[in-house]
Image (cartoon, grey):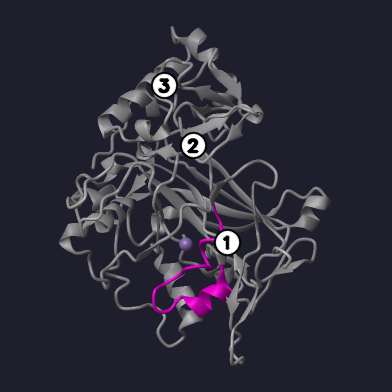
Amino acid sequence: MSVRIDETHGAALMSWLESANDPATDFPIQNLPFGRFRRPGEPGWRLGVAIGDQVLDLRFASVVDVSDMAQLMQLDGSSRHQLRWRISQGLRHGSVQQARFQAALLPAAEVEMGLPCEIGDYTDFYTSIHHATTVGKLFRPDNPLLPNYKWVPIGYHGRASSIGVSAPGLGHTFQRPRGQVKAAEADVPTLQASSRLDYELELGVFIGHPSSQGEPVTMAQAEEHVFGLSLFNDWSARDLQAWEYQPLGPFLSKNFASTVSPWMVTLDALAPFRAAFTRPASDPQPLAYLDSAVNQKLGAINIELEVWLQTRMMREVGHAGVQLTRCNYRDAYWTLAQLVVHHTVNGCNLRSGDLLGTGTLSGPLPEQGGSLLELSRGGKQPLVLPQGETRSFLSDGDTVILRGYCQAEGFRRIGFGECRGTVLSARQE
Ligand code: MN
């Protein structure tokens, strides 16, 4: 694991593209996140980098000669670093390649974004101890945090087929799921539309360089296998979850839809925002295979995260939405490297394009819950919204918007864009 800060991160670095120098943009020249895009009606995806309010077509700019994102993602760390360097060179003020790069730009507003890559396997972790404790109290009041939590990065295998991508407007839309629900006082469950539909504020971790089956990844190598991060909403049906989750974990309560943001922010871009990973002295320290000096010093990442809600009523009166939560990825109980290492310790291999979810990222304070389940105390204390509406869980027509950004003294702020999705009414029988 090496965290390298160089000229591509310089706060004074400017682009010849004016919108990239706007202090409010998520995509200054210091960011350079990767995604897939196309003009409306085009059959295939093109590989691009977000810069200001434009998208750079990497092939058209002669930066890469591949059209498959997985091919680009499987590069090792130093090749990925060189790629970042070339793109930064072409976009910076005074570049001799300006004309060629300029011809390869398309306005972001005129293109459609796809999933960042073909997603292979998807694993969702549970890395916020604050989330695990609060939710544990609601599901098991007598036994909130299970004894393995502080030793094992807990996760389950999710489903990639139903992951969709954010878009402007309503974003990724999906029907409210139906499933088995059993009320506490009922003798038998019923099949019905979920009445406790929720979001989960997460980060998506895209695997880049693959690992081989039977060869566990070490802490020193772990980040070599991570291409980048995006925002991730793991929509969850709490009533289905409560009935089905024991003994094998979540199943249909989680796999009906998940939403990812279209841009993968690379670990290179995140280098200036690394933070120390610490554990309270009273907690067990990680086992040796999950520990390293670099991980302790720089294993965490300082990413500010926000959840916004725009209800149908807000949309109708032109209200942009209300902020529900603000927290920071730095507070996670396990780091990126620890997730990769633990995932492969048994010999499991990771492939380019696999996706790891961090798990719901709740902060330490009650108002920093990364889901409505937490913010409404299990549905007992509905949130009161500006127009007088209330929410314990999501209503049809609700749009949930995740945002994320990094800032540090002496560096340019970079952002993740948006992860936006909307709940549609359940399918009629
Ligand atoms: Mn989750």
Which quadrant: the C terminus?
bottom right
Circle 1 SS class? loop
Residue 330 coordinates in the image, percent (x, y): 40, 54
- Residues at discs 2 and 3 in contact (Cβ within 8 Å): no
Nearer to us in this view, 38 or 17? 38
Say if 395 sits above or below 350 in the image. Answer: below
Question: What range is drawn magenta here?
Answer: 237-259
Ligand 1 within 8 Å, label 1 CB:
no
Which residue in the protein does label 3 denote? Answer: 87
Nearer to us in this view, 122 or 97? 122
CA gap between label 1 and label 3 equals 35 Å
Q: In this view, does 18 lie to the left or right of 341?
A: right
Q: Which callout, 2 or 1, points at the residue further toward the start of the chain?
A: 1
Say if 280 sits above or below 74 in the image. Answer: below
Instruction: Indicate the amino acid at tag 2.
Output: Arg
> Residue 31 sits in which quadrant?
top left
Question: Which residue does the image show at 51% across and 8% down from the upper left?
Answer: 99
For residue 191, say whether it is visible: yes
Q: Residues within 10 Å of mark 3 (few under 14, many from 20)?
A: many
Residue 298 coordinates in the image, percent (x, y): 29, 47
Which quadrant: the N terminus?
top left
Which residue in the protein does label 2 denote? Answer: 413
Q: Residues within 10 Å of mark 2 (few under 14, many from 20)?
A: many
Q: Which callout, 1 or 3, points at the residue further toward the start of the chain?
A: 3
Say if 177 sits above or below 138 in the image. Answer: above
Q: Does the magenta stretch include residue 154?
A: no
**Numbered disc in front, either 2 or 3:** 3
**Numbered disc in front, either 2 or 1:** 1
- Residues at discs 1 and 3 in contact (Cβ within 8 Å): no
Instruction: Indicate the amino acid at tag 3.
Output: Ile
Which residue in the protein does label 1 denote? Answer: 199
